[in-house]
Image (tube, coloured by chain):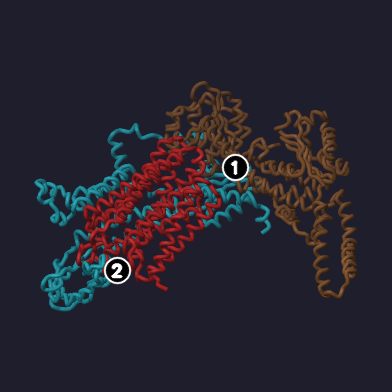
Amino acid sequence: MHLAVLGINHKTAPVELREKVSLNGDACASLSRGLIGESGIMEVVPLSTCNRTEIYAVASRPDAGKREIMASLGATAGVDLRELESCSYFHEGEIAVTHLYTVAGSLDSLVVGEAQILGQIKEAYHAAHENQTTSVLLNRLFRHALEVGKRVRTDTRIGENPVSVSSVAVEMVRKVFDDLEGRSVLLLGTGEMTELTATHLVSNGVTKFIVSNRTYSRAEEMAAKLEGTPVAFEDIADYLPLADIVISSTGAPHYVLHKGTVKKAMEKRHNRPIFFIDIAVPRDIDPGVNDVYNAFLYDIDDLNEVAQDNAAAREKEARKAEHIIAEEVDDFMRWHSSLDVVPTILAMREKAEEIRESELAKALAKFDSDLSENDRSSIEAMAAAIVKKILHSPTVELKKAANERGGYLYVESMRRMFRLNGSAGRAGDTGGNKEKPVQDRGKDEKPER
Amino acid sequence: MNTEKAAVAASATTTSMPIGKRIVHFLVSMKLALTLLFVIAILCIIGTILPQGDNVYLTDWPNNPLFDFYQTLGLFNMYYSWWFLSILSLLMANMLVCITKRLPTTIRHVVRPRVDVKDVFISNQPVSAVIDGEGQRVMKRAVKALSGRRYRIRTGASGTVLGERGRFSGVASISFHLSFIMLAVGALLGAFLGFDETVEIPDGRTAPIPHTDLQVKNNGFNLETVEIVDKGRVIGYRPLVYSSDLEIYRNGELVDSKVIEVNSPLRLRTYFYDLLNLEGINFHQNSYYRTSRGYVTVLGVNQLPGKNIIYLGFIMMMGGITFGLYFPHRRIWIKVGKEGKLLIGGRSHRSKVSFQRDFDQMITELRQSPQEEDKS
Amino acid sequence: MDLIKLEEILFIAAIFSYLVCSGIYIWYLVSRNRKAASLGTALLALGLTAHTVALILRWITSGHAPMANHYESLSVFGWAIMLFYLTAEKFYPIRAAGALVVPSGFIISSVALVFYSGPEPLAPALQSIWLWIHVSIAMLSYGLFALSFGVGFIYVVQEYLLKKNYDHVMGAFLILFALLGLVFGMWAGSYWAEPARVIADESTGAVKSVWSGSDYAKMFGGAGVGLVLALFLGYAAGKGASRQAFAKRLPSLDVLDEVSYRGIAFGFPLLTIGIVTGAIWADQAWGRWWGWDPKETWSLITWLFYGAYLHTRLTMGWRGRHSAVLAIAGIVVVMFTYLGVNLFLSGLHSYA
């Protein structure tokens, strides 16, 4: 039985192709049902997000699944097979396992360390499971992959260093204010970045927004979106004392907020801290504002610097994650190889031979030298024949089962019944029925979808 | 939004006032209090560096040509000099004014707290939230959550609920500040009506007590010592216990007697219900020294009318500061708003971050489990 | 089992665990290793338990509260710092501040070891129930002020970091390390000094140390070495901390501000009670509740200082760096009241 993955992702395929190949739940289900049974394909799990579409499959013949899967995917998505082939990758065995674990650990994501992918894998697996296109091998593989993804998130800090400017801004704001709930935010300008940062703030509990823009109608629009208050641009100095956080991104060619204005506002605020985020180029806020007591100013350069630091930190954590993944792949492969038919048969025979030899030696020792050479050899022949005959039908059945769906069940039960070692391992443990929900930790990440 | 703007504008500046008014303003201000605290601290530091009282005669200072001038200034008796006491008095006066200014608000907080408030008042509190859902029902749970947090609940005429904790924080603070007045009064009573003398009585002798018609007899001084060893060498003796057996006489008649030790003085009460401690006289074993003819007990004898006022001051001081700082005044208003949503908001006088955390936790609880609570 | 020996062993074990904890807390700040975090807390709790048992044993073997000499009161001081730090850590996410507070507690406790002496009988003036009430409450307040100082320092660093003012970060580290190095070096130097001890006051049995030139040389030599070493360390620490990435490891300003304030808000009433119980005791022993003795005066100065801190905060709305700087300066006043008065000024409290 052979494990393989065929897929395209953001590294191998342009977005136009990814869009076409992207499959919704129903498409996934019908595709996998169609594949099962064809040319020895026994298990299928499709995984499709906006950055990747991958088909994990278990087939009886090596490489046999590749053509069928490719064809089926091409047909479902309606793309040219040659185009698909040139943009896709195909991994087998250990490399396929490593690939899935790397995806689960979000190392293969566009934004390394993002949290969504784990949930997406979980969904894809559950859909396939319900669709009954999975069995022993993929069940175990995907459950283990979820565990691996979780372990990467808990054992490394890969998800803790935001790299986008807007989430870095929120991260730094939280170094001033412990809790963002109930804080007021003043937005100057209504650009895309402002909105993105505001969204991050909302997910951190901010509810009070004051929106201002040179064009009042735009301020009204944005205020309606954020359930905030629009104010006239000329009045911002009056509203400054009310704001704990100010985000500025107007297209003004000169400073919009001066040190003096902020100083006056601080007096009225009784020196409660205020955090300025200036994402405009050229800058909106006088850099001197940073010198005002309890006023903190981050411009786009500052934020980029932090983001780069964070990216470097993520790289470092990614190395740690790779170690974890390598470990877990080894674990899984140990379990997987134990399920091969040939070594199982060999192990079975070995065990039987051992028993035969030791029992024979015991029996022969009792006769001492009373037996003739002839007697001795006929006894030996009898023992050998018993062993051979007993083992014959299990061997045949195992070989047959190897090419059937769910054949691993036979192998595993055989291993258990004969107490052949090597069938357990960490990968085996995690494949049990205990299933914990996978938590999505980072909330300020760009989703893969 | 307009009300918020008005609130900001209302914090007017004081720079435009006439000079005289500004001086008065300064005299009753916190700035003066802080300046005085600072000045007193600096003077205290100087006082610990310069020898004070009789100690100055153990130093070279009396040989200084300007010594008499310094003495007149009170440099060597600083803590009792007219200017030091004036500064203390100024601080007391400033404090009294500050307390008086705050008193009406403090009393109103306790006696008639503001329960009925407008919607906008709640949403303008330092911490506030709006909870969706059926207002009245959530209100019940909110009240339960508040009383679970040991808030005292009051319901106003309009159905607004006020939860309060640490209501007496302000009163406690005032009691703390008033305690200094008590100490000052007690100290003044002691200084003008009482006395504090040192009487030295050799073993077995009798001596008269100044300011009174009493005599005290030292029936025996007792001393137990232990060796002080430093690097294997005995360098002296450390007293373990010393005591004097005293008998107090008035016109040859025995009034009282006791074996006194450092921490166990003889307290002579003229009459039992001397609430202000007007006539109690205390005999303390202050110290001792040795002469060629034996030990001499150094007795501290004092009469401090007003001591009970001082002790009352101590209690007010300790209680006031403890209650004032450990139990900050926290208020949370809850009201069903115009759209049927629940408005909730509040403020804490101190420890604002932990108040906010507590508040957030409560809001999360209120938002989360309406079904469970309804079942129970 | 010899209880005196056991107490000494437990105390040394506690100090050793504080040393290791200091290392772990600093390591946590550098690596943000989660295991280091929980290990540090667990070990600190263990050390604190050993310390507590040592104090109880000292109480039993000496027959009086362990607050009668420098060794005992310093030990209680160090104990209080650790206790309050652990308490604060339970309620606020301020583990990063532990990298400063825990070493401070370690230094205080190890200085106690320098002054180590066996159980001694109490001087007559100290034989009172007020001894442990007065001293323990004062020491608890000092412990809280020390916590406020440590957290206040982290506040200042964090604020400079968030303002990207790296020169000031470096300055803050250099000043802090210079102070710590001076004090610690001075103590280490005096450990080697061997001043002659003579009786200062026969009636109280107070002992005075007479310092010779070579003793002073040792003390100031120690201070000099400590200063130089500390400046190097401070420079390295300042360099390492001067990055935005470091700001992310420190708690938020809000939390630091509040913990530093709460340390003082809890410490000030204790200091008040400590001073008042001292006054009551003095009234009982000498018949006067206030006598402008240097220790009394300095405790008043400390009290005025923190009183001013509270007023600036509660009525004038000070917050942030100004308050934090006051909390830092406060510990200097506290340390002078606690140790400086005994070293440089004479008075009724010079028993040790």
User: Which one is closest to the eye, mark 2 or mark 1?
Assistant: 1
Q: Residue A435: x percent and y percent?
A: 72, 53
Which residue is tagged 2?
A: C122
Q: Which is nearer the eye, A418 or C88?
A: A418
Above-or-below relation of B10 to B297: above
Instruction: Tell me which chain appears brown.
Output: A
Q: Looking at the image, which residue sits at the far top?
A: A253
Compute the Cα span from label 2 to label 1.
60 Å
Quarter holding residue C112? bottom left
Secondary structure of residue under mark 2: loop
Q: Quadrant of the N terminus of chain C?
A: bottom left
Residue situated furthest bottom in the rendering: B253
Which of the labelled discs sits on residue C276, or is there none? none
Q: Which chain is cyan?
A: B
Q: Amino acid at mark 1?
A: Glu
Rendered image quadrant of residue A21: top right
Residue kind at label 2, given as amino acid type: Leu
**Coordinates of residue A162 in the picture (x, y in percent):** 59, 38
Residue A371 at x, y = what percent?
Answer: 87, 73
Which residue position is annotated with label 1? A317
User: Can marks 2 and 1 be said to lie on one chain?
Assistant: no
Relative to residue A437, is residue B122 drawn left or right?
left
**Apparent colour of chain C:** red
Q: Could you tell me which residue is drawn at 15 percent across and 72 percent down?
A: B295
Left or right side of A447 for C152: left
Do we see residue B99 in this rendering? no
Q: State the residue in front, A157 or A115.
A: A157
Badge 2 sits on which subunit? C
